[in-house]
Amino acid sequence: MSERHITITDNKSGKSVDLEVKTGTHGPPTVDVSGLYKDLGYFTFDPGFMSTASCHSQITFIDGDEGILLYRGYPIEQLAEKSNYLEICYLMTYGALPSPNQLENYSSMIVHHTMLHESLKTFFNGFHYDAHPMAIMVGVVGSLSAFYHDSTNIQDPVCREISAHRLIAKMPTIAAACYKHSLGEPFQYPRNNLSYCGNLLHMMFSVPTEEYVPDPIAEKALNLLFILHADHEQNASTSTVRLAGSSGANPFACISAGIASLWGPAHGGANEAVLDMLHEIGDVASIPKYIAKAKDKNDPFRLMGFGHRVYKNFDPRATIIRKTCHEVLEKLGDQSNPLFEMALQLEEIALQDPYFQERKLYPNVDFYSGIIYKALGIPTNMFTVMFAIARTSGWVAHWMEMISDPRQRISRPRQLYDGAATRDYVSIDQR
Ligand code: ACO
């Protein structure tokens, strides 16, 4: 028995069980309830996983009360200021910051995996021109296993690494193709001389008839947004990737499952929903009406971009993005962007309101990200796609960590069944 444990006693049977209390590097002590059913015959009940740690992980740490976010131990503020997205991808995958040589080799590896199989491109024609790009992305990423089955042996660490590189490299190409398909423009091949974000801008906004040089302001802003969105421990989409992967599914299928989960407005779809909400509010004078709607329990309206399961303090990513929003709009000559003005007002009014104060509802990362994407000329329905590109580095790192963990088992939650009790079948003529 470990030094610290919790004893649970069933006051009906008098039976007791000692549960080990585990401690991590940071974070609250964690009670290991895995033996509870075997020893006492009980399940634990925790809908929404409010108090459940689903796995060991060494990738990301969040302290929601203090507003702390660490990737592999490094504070998000330092990474946002000093790093770049490909370095973050390396950090996520391998657990340490790369040496200059390692980063060069890694970048070259990613750059040489950015093209899509030519046959894969024909898939896009099966989608209607106005299909939501997230719908296309879920399908196309899932189909990658049909094209790259040489790397789907998940027991082989080399295959896992190649799959990780392919996913990180091809996501921008797929995302840009989703966008080009909606415009009816030809897909642009990736360019190896551009940065990860510069290449994405090139594939989205260039046309074969003209020279295109990515705007360094846009490149820098995207780089920052991608760093901030790279990982967030066991959020809904990452948990979905882990759950799908726990059965031994191939990595492309698992990431496709993660993209599907990300799409929901309570998760990654919030960035699109925030812009829709700001447009719906329309002007500053209407803000009080929408604040009242958000507080009304009989109204399904919620203030999108507000609240977070883990952060009960400012989301540190929102603080960084808010500042960047000012800078980007200023540099793009768009200081008086009406959406940003309205977002600032909305934030101020909500933060002074006891409803939001009592529930510790603060702006989250996506309250401002959409405003930056919009200012960069990225259409609203592509916002969650941008998020998916960035989060791929985190999903892939979690998937690799899970598969290589010797404790890994299929994820199989139980339930509190409250349906009909055992009853006999009644033949149809007697019902
Ligand atoms: N507007 C109004 N009220 C809210 C909001 C909101 N955005 N968010 C939470 N609340 C209220 C709830 O009604 C509830 O009130 P009650 O205690 O009186 O019943 C209380 O705050 C707690 O909310 P829960 O829904 O229980 O919190 P949970 O942790 O389950 O949900 C979530 C977190 C999904 C993020 C929620 O705050 C929300 O829907 N926010 C808007 C969507 C959003 O911005 N999502 C992006 C999250 S960040 C990301 O995934 C990248």
Image (cartoon, rainbow, N blue to C red):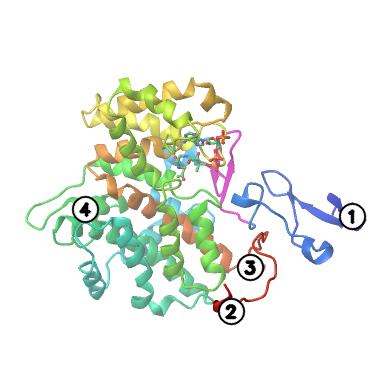
Q: Earlier in the sequence, mark 4 or mark 1?
A: 1
Q: Which residues are magenta?
A: 57-75
Callout 4 crowding tier (Cα within 10 Å): few <14, some 14–19, many ≥20: many
Mark 4 falls on what kind of element? helix
Label 3 – label 1 distance at C-alpha: 34 Å
The local secondary structure at tag 3 comes to loop
Please give the label number shown on residue 427: 2
Q: Reading the chain from its start, which is encountered first: label 2 or label 3?
A: 3
Between circles 3 and 1, the one closer to the viewer is 1
On the image, numbered disc 4 is attached to which residue? Answer: 204
Residue sitting at x 28%, y 30% = 339
Residue with the mark numbered 1: 12
- Percent of width and height locating residue 65: 61, 34
The image shows residue 74 at horizontal and vertical percentages of 54, 44
Viewport quadrant of the C terminus: bottom right
In the picture as drawn, the residue positioned furthest to the front comes out as 430
Q: Nearer the viewer, mark 2 or mark 3?
A: 2
Q: Magenta stretch: residue 64 in it?
A: yes
Instruction: Check if mark 2's residue and mark 4's residue have beta carbons within 8 Å.
Output: no
Q: Quadrant of residue 116?
A: bottom left
What label sits on residue 408 in the rendered view? Answer: 3
